Image: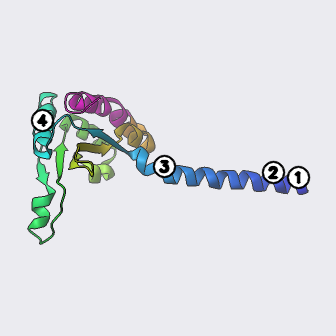
Amino acid sequence: MEVIFIISAGIIIGMLLLGLIVWLSMPRMMLVVHQSRYSSVEETCNKLKNAIEANGWECPAIRNMNMAMKKQGVEMEKQVWIVELCNAKYAKNVLTTNPEVSTLMPCAWGVYEGKDGNIYISGMNTGLMGKMFGGNIAKVMGGNVSKDERLILKDVIQE
């Protein structure tokens, strides 16, 4: 009886530790950060917009978060902008089967000045996010969307 208790306790403790490790790793796994080739947030955003449109996507908006927050009396030292991107064909494919994920659309990248003065682009790990949802979302997000994002970013980020 003691052996069964020890084995059961070991399994439970192991599962709890694994769960904790996954929980603590998720934020780093869900976000992908790249260093920009360019020396300013504005130039990086403009290059992203051009790359988005050159790859058949739309860039519905570029949002200067510093300006938006300044209008409400809040100032930030470092620049933070948001570049939106959308592909209507992929969006329709996902939203037809899973309209609840509309909260995640349009897709967006954050462009910001890091503490080190370099410019970074951050975005969701669409491949991993797709796998987490499964089904059609995994097919679209983990397939064409991830592939297209790599193409869009290739000339804007440092390898």
Element under disc 2 = helix
Query: Pointer 3: what residue?
Result: 25
Above or below, 89 against 9 in this view is: above
Residue bearing mark 1:
3
**Mark nearer the viewer, 2 or 4:** 4
Q: CA distance from mark 2 to mark 4?
A: 57 Å
* Tag 3–tag 2 contact (CB < 8 Å): no
Amino acid type of the residue that numbered disc 1 sits on in the rendered structure: Val
Residue 120 location, quadrant = top left
Magenta residues (range): 139-159
Per the image, the residue denoted by label 2 is: 7
* Image position, residue 4 (x, y; %): 85, 53
Tell me the number on the disc at residue 47.
4
Whichever of labels 2 and 4 marks the residue nearer the N terminus, that label is 2
Residue sitting farthest toward the front = 116
Q: How far is the residue under mark 1 from the one under mark 2?
A: 6 Å
Q: Secondary structure at mark 3?
A: helix
Q: Is residue 154 magenta?
A: yes
The residue carrying pointer 1 sits among few (fewer than 14), some (14 to 19) or many (20 or more) residues within 10 Å by Cα, namely few
Helix, strand or loop at disc 4? helix
